[in-house]
Image (cartoon, rainbow, N blue to C red):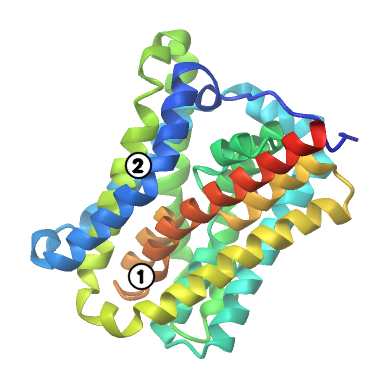
């Protein structure tokens, strides 16, 4: 078991060296970038009118970049710590979908927004969770393992969970959704992993570019999503923001609490907080746009901004407490 003051070593290139500095800067700037993209989509929705069909391809770019950062060691970590990784997966795919359903009911959201909030909860871990865990002095190895497996399992888990919880609001074609996740998530991730295995260190010189490419691509997705529901945002924005803040905040708290209850230690509990509370909102936005409506994608767009802001703030607070405990 890890002590409260133990720090884990980064296991991915995006948490060390020049690539690590680029990733940490990208995480810091990302909320501003996405907020600007959302403002652009709101101010000039006509500029993105024909971009809706491009969202799945844009998401594929993000997931391919994620695959490029993976190594076989990410999967070995699962075998080395099956209990902790299994707990992280169960916590992620139980807490966030359940919270989405509860918040949709508690706030009496419209069917489109309710389905969107629930879909965010059913998505796999967020692509920035590993870097934020590193900033928080958390267990990066556990974070990487949970994020990797939750992404690989998404085609099998996200569609049935969405059908179960959002089916009362809108029709859900779980089979079609599963196919879309395979095409836009799993295949690009596998493609990136294969390219990384084939070219190895020759890719190191471009690793620092990947966080920025991912951030810019997600920003474009947000702009397209916001443009598609620009007319409805003024009346729904306040309620959506409240739903997202509750969803993310409770997810971070309950994820951390799950690690504490399981006595995983402070670094692992910090990793659990971000693996539960941070979602792949780009995937949620893509699926909502394709299977529901642009309005249903609005919670995912707002989540893209908010969970990076809250993640950075919580990581700074956790890092400060870890340093105080080590003194």
Residue 215's disc is 2
Examine the rendered structure and indicate whether residue 235 appears above or below residue 271: below
For marks 2 and 1, give the CA distance: 18 Å
Task: Tell which residue pokes out farthest to the top in this image.
Answer: 202
* Residue drawn at point x = 35 percent, y = 42 percent: 215
Q: Position of residue 14 (x, y in %)?
A: 50, 26
Q: Are marks 2 and 1 in contact (CB under 8 Å)?
A: no
Where, quadrant-wise, is the C terminus in this rendering?
top right
Residue 34's disc is none
Q: Position of residue 65 (x, y in %)?
A: 40, 33
Q: Secondary structure at mark 1?
A: helix
How many discs mark residues in the rendered view? 2
Examine the rendered structure and indicate whether residue 210 appears above or below residue 61: above
Residue 112 appears anywhere in the view: yes
Where, quadrant-wise, is the N terminus in this rendering?
top right
Q: Secondary structure at mark 2?
A: helix
- Residues 30 and 73: in front is 30
Examine the rendered structure and indicate whether residue 104 appears above or below residue 321: below
Identify the residue under disc 1: 298
Side (left or right) of 289 relative to 107:
left
Q: Position of residue 98 (x, y in %)?
A: 65, 72
Residue 139's quadrant in the figure? top right
Side (left or right) of 307 relative to 45:
right
């Amino acid at each position: 078991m890890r002590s409260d003051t133990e720090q884990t070593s980064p296991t991915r290139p995006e948490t060390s060296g020049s690539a690590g500095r680029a990733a940490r800067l990208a995480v810091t700037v990302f909320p501003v970038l996405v907020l600007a993209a959302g403002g652009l989509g709101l101010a000039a929705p006509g500029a993105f009118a024909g971009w809706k069909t491009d969202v799945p391809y844009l998401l594929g770019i993000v997931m391919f970049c994620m695959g490029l950062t993976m190594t076989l060691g990410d999967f070995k970590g699962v075998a080395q710590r099956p209990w902790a990784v299994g707990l992280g997966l169960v916590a992620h795919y139980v807490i966030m979908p359940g919270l989405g359903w509860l918040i949709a009911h508690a706030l009496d959201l419209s069917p489109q927004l309710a389905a969107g909030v629930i879909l965010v909860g059913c998505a796999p871990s967020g692509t920035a969770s590993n870097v934020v865990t590193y900033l928080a002095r958390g267990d990066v190895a556990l974070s990487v393992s949970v994020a990797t497996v939750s992404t690989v399992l998404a085609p099998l888990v996200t569609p049935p969970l969405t059908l179960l919880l959002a089916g009362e609001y809108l029709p859900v074609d779980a089979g079609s959704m599963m196919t879309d996740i395979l095409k836009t998530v799993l295949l690009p991730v596998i493609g990136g992993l294969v390219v990384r295995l084939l070219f190895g260190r020759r890719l190191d010189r471009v690793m620092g570019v990947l966080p920025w490419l991912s951030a810019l691509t997600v920003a474009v997705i947000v702009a397209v999503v916001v443009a598609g529901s620009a007319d409805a945002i003024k009346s729904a924005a306040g309620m959506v923001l409240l739903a997202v803040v509750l969803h993310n905040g409770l997810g971070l708290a309950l994820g951390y609490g799950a690690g504490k209850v399981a006595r995983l230690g402070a670094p692992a509990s910090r990793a659990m907080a971000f693996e539960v509370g941070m979602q792949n909102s780009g995937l949620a936005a893509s699926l909502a746009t394709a299977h529901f409506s642009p309005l249903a994608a609005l919670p995912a767009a707002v989540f893209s901004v908010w969970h990076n802001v809250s993640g950075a703030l919580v990581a700074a607070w956790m890092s400060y407490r870890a340093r105080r405990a080590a003194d």
